[in-house]
Image: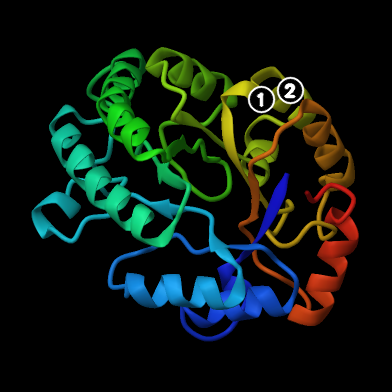
Amino acid sequence: MKFSAAGGWFGGDHYNRYREAAKYGFKGVEQLGWLGLDFDKVRAVQEETGVVSTAIVIQSVDENVSKLLPWSHGMVWEDASDAFVTAFKESVAAAKAMGVPNIIATTGNERHDVPREKQHEIVVNTLKRMAPIAEEAGIMIILEPLNILVDHKGYYLVTSAEGYDMIREVGSPNCKLLFDIYHQQISEGNLIKNIRAGIDLIGHFHIGDHPGRNEPGTGEINYKNVFKAIKETGYDRWLAFECGRTVDVETLSKNMHELIDEFDD
């Protein structure tokens, strides 16, 4: 288990956040957008600090491709499949340039013109097209369910169970689920049981408490028990803080290290 800080906790630009993460004792930082970055500058600051980037999202520099990626259209549409594959190739190139191990994929919002079963099939088919690209590059596609009760009304993929089904159907070691603990607490609860049930299908975790989507300790999730359960499974990939903060960075970092140090490898 390895823990990365939320880039939004720190001030300054994308590059300075590596320095801030290192200053406060984190080995990784989660900053999802990559468009417009100077990749040479990213690698230089990574070498300087010893901090790595842990995930990016699928994006494209091509406006015609980009217009098919937002959730208002998204991966649930057949005519977006080529755009997602093209954008994924671009994102893989960015990930390789920055040494990023994970690329986040989202489904987009649910359609109402075709059954959910059809949308499920379309998403799986597009992920199957991406999987060989990910395998060749040695990079993980991580598919993210999100909650529709608080933050993302209308989003297609909500439950971990359907997410696990999709990952099984894709059948690639380089396509797994992003289990966002905050989102899944809202959507379904039963966190430890659901994590254990699909741990071999999980490639990344996001961390945030509920309500408020701030740091652990500000809401109802017993993160010490959740982390203990994850540790017991043998999971050895990243867990990324993807949340706000309610205190200054120095206090926040002290509190988070007190929580994670017994689990951090």
Quarter assignment of residue 80: top left
Cβ atoms under marks 2 and 1 closer than 8 Å: yes
Q: Identity of the amino acid at label 1?
A: Ile
Where does residue 140 sit, x and y in percent of width and height? Answer: 44, 38
When the figure is inspected, residue 67 is found, relative to residue 52, above or below; the finding is above
Residue at the far left: name it: 64
Which numbered marker is on residue 199?
A: 1
Where does residue 121 sit, x and y in percent of width and height? Answer: 31, 16
Q: SS at mark 2?
A: helix
Q: Residue at x 32, y 45 (%)?
A: 71
Q: Residue at x 47, y 82 (%)?
A: 13
Of residues 138 and 3, the one nearer the viewer is 138
Where does residue 111 sit, x and y in percent of width and height? Answer: 29, 30
Where does residue 105 sit, x and y in percent of width and height? Answer: 39, 41
- At label 2, counting other C-alpha atoms closer than 10 Å, the crowd grade (few under 14, some 14-19, many 20 or more) is some
- At label 1, counting other C-alpha atoms closer than 10 Å, the crowd grade (few under 14, some 14-19, many 20 or more) is some
Q: Residue at x 14, y 35 (%)?
A: 82
Q: Residue at x 77, y 22 (%)?
A: 193
Residue at image mark 2: 196
